[in-house]
Image (cartoon, rainbow, N blue to C red):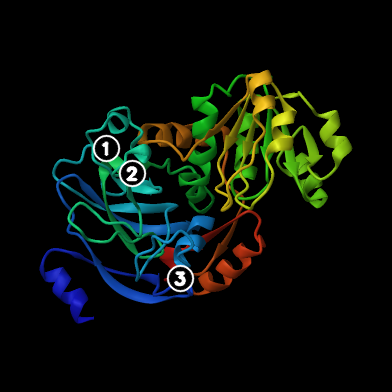
Amino acid sequence: MSNVLAGSEKGEVSAYGWAARDDSGILSPFHFTRRANGDNDITLEILYCGICHTDLHFARNDFGMSIYPMVPGHEIVGKVTKVGSKVTKFSVGDIAGVGGSVGSCGSCSECSEGFYVYCPKMILTYSARCHDGTVTQGGYSDNLVVDQNFAVLIPKSMPLASTAPLLCAGITVYSPLKYHGLTQPGLHLGVVGLGGLGHVAVKFAKAFGMRVTVISTSPSKKKEALERFGADAFLVSRDQQQLQDAVGTMDAIIDTVSANHSIQPLIGLLKTRGKLILLGGPAKPLEVLAMPLLLGRKMIAGSAGGGREEIQEMINFAAKHNITADVEVISMEYVNTAMERLEKNDVKYRFVIDVANTI
């Protein structure tokens, strides 16, 4: 505790969370400090934090870039308890959300266009080095100090626990739909995978008025896709006849699956000039035949999210159309069990930690 007290004496903020200490990924209680609230900063009392599959990867150092000890979490909703002297976007008492980024260079072309998530010097919400060399820590904790330009305002009318995952899953699916012009009513969108990202993608696409086909390896998900989330059709990707019947019918496909899988059959489902947009990151390199792309003028693209303005737009759209994630709310002490279940895809459809009431 002495380090926490010493940090407080320097104006830093005492914090308490759950951290992974090594690549076992096991989390346990952890006292640490956050930077002092600067002129452009806000301090949040964290209320809820979603658990993203990326948290599991980072906790276990699957990407080879984890910094320990590590407090994960980048689907953060909290109450503003302090604002800096130059803060104009928030007031004390507001509800704010923070996603996957908390910093960038602020001067490159991507930053100037509001897409700091693509800045070469983008700073992740956790397990990254800040400009001053300190390490960022995420939302599995009681508070957060963040630059106002990396937070968004959450309408108080929204259910906060099920809104938290929108800060990652929501913008991950919303941004490519907007960027690629896939918001026109009547367009046919395929959504590969009905998990944390996929179920939110269906909700946004239906709100845009699109025709949606869920593509999955699991026939058991058909009822939920059609009845719970309102998809128009369901395609079992292992059924060759179903694939054949759907060839050339989709304007675009969003692929949310991170497990290794072939994308070649998906390309065949696209219409001429169709777009396959990858949101998952399989570990193995993709193998693709060039001719179907050339002859159909088809495109394979990727997307990693959006900037503050687009996240705010997404949140406002979600509030207007009553879009939230389907969640299972858990206590902080359950987090290691939740990670084990997440690895087995045993969640419908996102775990969210009730931080304020259980930490």
- In this figure, which residue is indicated by the disc labeled 3? 358
Quadrant where the C terminus is found in the figure: bottom left
Q: Give me the disc on residue 207.
A: none
Badge 1 vs badge 2, beta-carbon distance below 8 Å: yes
* Residue 336 in sight: yes
Element under disc 3 = helix
Q: Nearer the viewer, residue 181 or 294?
A: 294
Q: Against 36, is 258 above or below? A: above
Nearer-N-terminus badge (1/2) = 1
Residue beneath the point at 47% across and 42% down: 157
- In this figure, which residue is indicated by the disc labeled 2? 151
Q: What's the CA distance linking mark 1 and mark 3?
A: 29 Å
Q: Against 166, is 4 above or below? A: below
Q: Amino acid at mark 3?
A: Thr
Residue beneath the point at 62% across and 36% down: 254
User: In x, y percent, where is residue 260?
Assistant: 64, 51
Nearer-N-terminus badge (1/3) = 1
Residue beneath the point at 89% across and 36% down: 241
